[in-house]
Image (cartoon, rainbow, N blue to C red):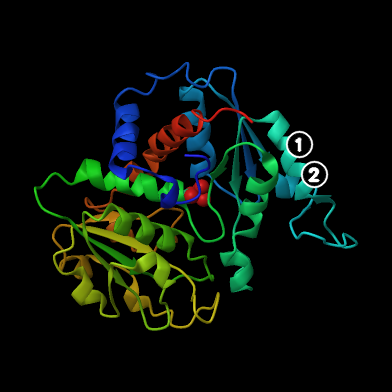
Amino acid sequence: MKNFLSVNEVGDLSALVAKALAYKADPFKDSKLGEHKRLGMLFLNPSMRTRISTQIAAKNLGMDAIVFNVGQDGWTLEFEDEAIMSGTTVEHVKEAAPVLGKYFDILGVRTFPSLKNKEDDYSELYINQFIKYAGVPVLSLESATLHPLQSLTDLITITETFKEKRKPKIVLTWAPHVKALPQCVANSFSQWITAWGQADFVITHPEDYELDSKFTKGATITHNQDEALKEADFVYIKNWSTYKDYGKIYCNDPEWMLTNKKLALANKAKIMHCLPVRRNVELSDEILDGPNSIVTQQAGNRVWAAQAVLAELLKIKRQ
Ligand code: CP
């Protein structure tokens, strides 16, 4: 693993999940692996779980982690090559990234999409510019289109929860929201579950909310949420904005919010969400506070996902 941006960098997915679960069982078993190594964590957007869990993971491996909130603490960065920097941007990533590469052994970066220009967002310009210029392994802390640490966490949570000798039925359902949100979590979850290949995977959403098909190949896609929920073992709830007519909210039907009545169709399904979640908009109180919700277990597993990935990236020799 040279960088960690998506499932495509993972050779053996089940082995990475097993490695994460081994860290959960024994957090300090590799406490010298990252000794005298530093992790830089750059946030161009807010975060609670990613930021704290990755810091804990680094500490468990004996690494130092330094967090830098680019938007609040740093100079405004320019990412476009050949930009004429006469506007608001102060420093080009061509200077910033190699400087950070001198300070850190691994560089974590969180960006978000603009949701205005699909081509720009889906080219992953920001994180790719860090990869191009930093000279050290880059760890995605969520990019414009994917959230791989979240998806690895989701797979860890499903693996440790589902003990039956058959494939689980996993349903990703769109839910309403007040804001236009990125497709990152839904894209990434679809990419990881289809790559895993050990589930009956169904995606349900209203018309016009189709995700990029390159992430959903192998999934069953339906606009009928009730049908999708039947016999589900896991229901992953997430809002996303439209992909085709990019970054819009079309339907925002509150009927798509999951309730106990809807959940009765499923097979005592466990409820998953990446958090943060808007209560009683995206997901009802009764579901979040109910016995089937595993959202806290899921967020707790962020530590072990980050620790497994950092351990893999630490194997790379500094250039
Ligand atoms: N799920 C997730 O990435 O949470 P944060 O935005 O709080 O990091």
Q: In the visual, does 169 lie left or right of 215?
A: left
The numbered mark at residue 144 is none
The numbered mark at residue 95 is 2
What amino acid type is highlighted by mark number 2?
Glu
Read off the residue under disc 1: 99
Q: Position of residue 77 (x, y in %)?
A: 77, 52
Using the numbered discs, state the Cα–Cα distance from disc 2 to disc 1 in whole angstroms. 6 Å
216 vs 246, nearest the viewer:
216
Q: Position of residue 124 (x, y in %)?
A: 59, 59
292 vs 241, nearest the viewer:
241
Which residue shows up at 68% across the image and 41% down it? 134
Q: Secondary structure at mark 1?
A: helix
- Residue 221: quadrant of the picture: bottom left
Count of marks overlaid on the render:
2
Q: Secondary structure at mark 2?
A: helix
- Residue 11: quadrant of the picture: top left
